[in-house]
Amino acid sequence: MKEDWLKWSIEYAEDYDFPDNWFGKIYFVRCKTPPFCLREMRPLQCRFFPLAPHISSEGTLHLIISPVDLPYACPLVKNHIKLEDKFIKANYTVWKRLIKDPLIYDLIKMDSSSRDSISLTYII
């Protein structure tokens, strides 16, 4: 928590919209100067971007382009730049592993359910 280029905050899950099985302290980590942080040093969610995990109503894990609004324009999304296949496959492999944790699975499932009303294109 001593990195000068990251902003850490300790919050309580109950104060945010997290699944019911999330409680107690949670840690938020943000780059202070997005999008100019070294990718290899960023928090995982930043490294995965612009991909995001999505669990379909059938329970299948997919990757989508993140629909989250950002305070800056990501050139990959704005310019529709094709992502490298090895980047997509590596993301998928990591998310398959991460969602084995019930807390992460429940969070991704909750986030996915909140996107049910928008049209999504599965990358994988």
Image (cartoon, helix red, strand yellow):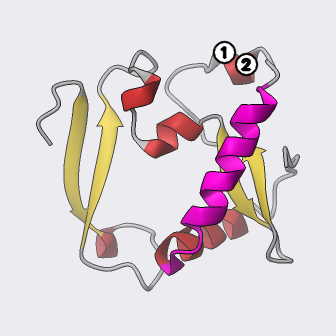
Residue at 19% over, 57% down: 10
Which residue occupies the foreground of this view, 102 or 119? 102
Q: Could you tell whether 78 is left or right of 95 in the image? A: right
Furthest residue in direction left, as rendered: 2
Helix, strand or loop at label 2? It is helix
Q: What residue is shown with label 2?
A: 78
Q: Could you tell whether 110 is left or right of 116 in the image? A: left
Give the percent coordinates (x, y) of residue 100: 58, 74
Q: Residues within 10 Å of mark 1 (few under 14, many from 20)?
A: few
Q: Quadrant of residue 54?
A: bottom right
Provide the residue span drawn in magenta: 83-102
Residue at 38% over, 78% down: 22
Q: Could you tell whether 109 is left or right of 86 in the image? A: left
The amino acid type of the residue labelled 1 equals Pro
Verify whether residue 90 appears in magenta: yes
Q: Is residue 111 visible?
A: no
Give the percent coordinates (x, y) of residue 57: 83, 75
Q: Could you tell whether 53 is left or right of 58 in the image? A: left
Name the image quarter holding the N terminus. Answer: top left
Furthest residue in direction bottom, as rendered: 21
Separation of disc 1 and disc 2 at Cα?
A: 5 Å
Residue 75 badge: 1
Helix, strand or loop at label 1? It is helix
